[in-house]
Amino acid sequence: MNSIDPVGLANTVLGGALLGGLIALSAVGLSLVLGVMKLVNLMHGQIVVLGAYAAFYLAAFWGISPLLALPIVFVLGFAFTAPVQHFILAPVAKHGEEAGLLTTFALAIILENLFIRFFSGDSRSLDTAFSRETLAIGPINLPTIYLIGFAISLTVCLAVWMLVTRTSFGRSLRASSEDPISAAIVGIHVSRVRWGTFALNGGLASMGGVLIALCFSFTPSSGSEYLLTAFAIIVLGGLGNIMGTFVGGIALGVIQSLGAYFFGDGYRTFVGLVMLIILLAIAPNGILKRRRSL
Amino acid sequence: MKNGISILLSRIATPTRVGPRDFIIVAVLAAVAFAVPYFAGTYQQEVGFRILQLGALAAAWNIAAGYTGLVSLGSAAFFGIGVYTMAIASNAGLPIALCVVLAALVAGLFALIVSPALFRLRGLYFTVGTLALAEAMRIFVVNSPWFGGQAGIYLTARAPKAYDLYWIALLIAVFVVVCVLLLLRSRWSYRMQAVRDDEDVASQLGVRTYRTKLWAFGLSGALIAIVGSIQALNQGIVQPNGGFGMSWTIDIVSVAIIGGMGTKVGPWVGAVFIVLLGEFLIQFPEIHLAVVGVVLVLVIRFMPNGIWGTLTLALQKNRNFS
Amino acid sequence: MHLSTRRRRLAGGLAFITATALALTGCSPIGADGGTSDSSEPIRIGATIPLSGALAGFGSFLQWGYQHAVDEVNAAGGIMIDGTAREVELTLVDDKSDPNEVTSSIKTLISSTKVDALLGSCTPDLVNPGAVVADSQGVPFVAECTPIEVFKSVKEWTYAWDIFFSVADQAVAPFEALEANGIETNKQVFILHDNGPDGQAIGNEIWPAVAADQGYTIAGNIEFPADNTDFSAAIQKAKESGADIVFISSITPAAISIRKQMAAIGWTPKVIVAEKGAEPVQFAEALGDLADGIIVGAYWDPSFGYPGAEELKDAFESETGLTSSQHIADSYTAAMVLMDAIAAAGSLDKDEINDAIGETDGIYAVGPVKFDDEHAAKIPVVSSQWQDGVPIIVWPTEQATGDFLFPVP
């Protein structure tokens, strides 16, 4: 390896932090779904990719800039996932936690193949005027798109945090998460809360997909990688903890960048996954307990 | 953590059900299967190989997932270990039988190494952990300089004939079945079931839960690796994206769920179904995997015990009424 | 008591198996099934191609190239076998970009479809497993889309053949292009390559060797896995190295990400060479004007004037409405070489067909095809450069279709 260059290292770490915060947007919803619905959503990665495709076609056909398309993509993601919860996931919930997990696993397979069928296997990428600009702070150059994505992600995470902590939907959501039976007794429409949570996740993950596609390329098969990244982030940030997820994203970004800087880019994901396994292991059952802090 | 599937399963998978009759049925079926290459052509032998391969994989997975409640999405890691052990060991000149044993040992060792981390995870978190583990293994093998990178390893051993492969797969399938049956007859099965149904209660009742889980997970992984080692012979060339590919995990889980998790016969019913469906859909390649996905969704929703589980439950009901 | 009963019954079961086995040892298992000889049967050619999965981008071109060749031969009356004209039937199976699927599908094509010969998939990952099976079962197999060195390195082939360019030629081409066009740089090269079979060969060995030969220095060399997506650390290091020239060998998604991330950190090397990944038109589509100036090795353009080349391009574009790719030329050629060999053999005997493939010596749509001792036919490499979404040939000068764009805008 080359000798360590402090400027290069600073660039790497800062870039990683921004990128991590940006990617955190795709993980926030997953954290809610896991915390509130006790559902390991294995189709999460495909929803992220779906958001990227939605923005791609909005740009290709109507010339809508991906950043401006974010609200539309949110609505599309919401509208797509709401019926999935209502018609497919809710009915199997009575068969236990694994049934939901395995159903989303099957849905992931279906979605990935539909993407290939309808969008072709080609690599795609989203582009904006900001994608190729940099912001120089002294000797450090940061991609403008990372900064914009970071800011958008932070804003949305704050909005979700407000939604969960300050609104009646949020109260219902927290109540159903802690004790669904008591929540139902006090008159909370638990199934509607679940439905809302899953669809909210759909919208958030789709927007996250747009931000990711602005920085990288994507293919129909990109989903599983985003799923694992999102899991690593929510475990780092604490389950169901919304601002924690955002911080978790930044932490993962920095860890991965350092891993990549010292061992090579190939080990970026590897370092993240090993982190995930270690964290899962050293937080003994704590992951489960901590969701009460929602 | 008690959950729905487990409750349902505990009605079907009662360990006491295994008797000498099961061994005799296996022996008879094995004898019939043994004769297949004498009257069926190469194609049928290859389809038979795939059925035996997938059935053995799902049956092995079932030991951890169905009987012990360790639902793993990390099967590809063990499979890949088997594939690569065979490639490296057989190229080093070791006899095939020894390579197979070696594959099982390496996989068992791997289970031992990862268990301290994985077993702190319960239920769904264990599942996510295994998924991450398998992906980490694939990326590690792709990146590390010792396993030929993405180019993989070419097996210098002479390629086996279709019937050789078929018989080897049959032998391994019988071995897996006998392992499962003996396990279900032993005291281990009670411990495994106790762990599956409620780990905390099991622990309070004096079951050494960690050791029970390790045995189930290790045995399951070692058997998967044995099947994996045969895939290396089948392919003649091994690559990380093939050996450690997610497709193995997808296939194993699909077969076990469609057949019936936690049942003795389910994995084999599922394997026949999935392989024949694949052969049938070969003219419609674009929709193949999507159809498997749809079948999975329908089975989980309408037959949560799989084809075999649903059948046996229906038969039991009938018997109770009459 | 209970135990001993069980033992006895088990022993009974085992005895039964042994008895059956003994009864059967008289006969032998059914091995390779004989081919068809009925003259009303078509000639069967099969292939697996990636129609889904990561490499699906290639699949559609291969599908079209193979089918077009077969349709042409059938339209001309098929192939004469033992004095009777027979139709050619093409069976294409999706290998889902998965090497395991290649193995099982090729086995099914041989044993169930009973193909007389096989064509290849695309990229070494998918071609090599198929070639290994075909070779061990004695079925002629003509592949393309796999650089010949990578193909040769697997084993000594008997029944498998490859028509493609050489990585060594491909490695030299950009240096020659720079030289021929009088491009001046600081002669510092930074290499970014994936660890696929061809990526390793070109990145670790061939490029460094050729660079040294041509008077260039290697400022750095970074390897990454083929499906990597984030390259910021590698690009950061490349930028710090001060190299004017960047050489990339990767698949398309990686090549797109690398170029985007270069732009994102505001670094534009003077020369970018992106082998393999920058070749399909989706690369230029995804990047827009960021693709401008990127050099990629190519092996075919309709303007080269090989027989049928222009017609091939026109047929593809009018039938599919898509922009043509050079992969239609090599897949079409591979199928034509195979069918010409079957015609030359005049028989469906696999060894005769195989011998006839080895004798191939002619000019096809992709260029001259003649196999060497190691079963590879080398097609010449040219350098092309993306300019306004169109690949322009910039070297060799006599085949150039436009001017060299320097530096990268």
Image (cartoon, rainbow, N blue to C red):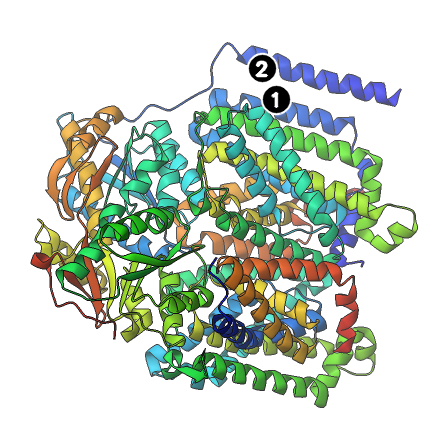
Task: Tell whether B189 sits left or right of A143.
Answer: right
Protein chain holding label 1: B
Q: Quadrant of residue C113?
A: top left
Q: Secondary structure at mark 2?
A: helix
Whether label 1 touches label 2, CB < 8 Å: yes
Q: Which residue is mark 1?
A: B31
State whether residue A138 is above or below residue B246. below
Residues A48 and C377: in front is C377
Q: Residue furthest top?
A: C26
Q: Real-space Cα distance between discs 1 and 2?
A: 8 Å
Q: Quadrant of residue A65?
A: bottom left
x then y, percent, for residue B38: 49, 19
Q: Quadrant of the image for the C terminus of chain C?
A: bottom left
Q: Quadrant of the image for the N terminus of chain C?
A: top right
x then y, percent, for residue A126: 39, 75
Tell me the residue at 40%/71% (across/down).
C261
Task: Tell whether C42 sits left or right of A255.
Answer: left
Residues packed near mark 2 inside 10 Å, few (<14), some (14 to 19) or many (20 plus): some
Dot label at residue C80: none
Q: Which residue is mark 2?
A: C21
Q: Amino acid at mark 2?
A: Ala
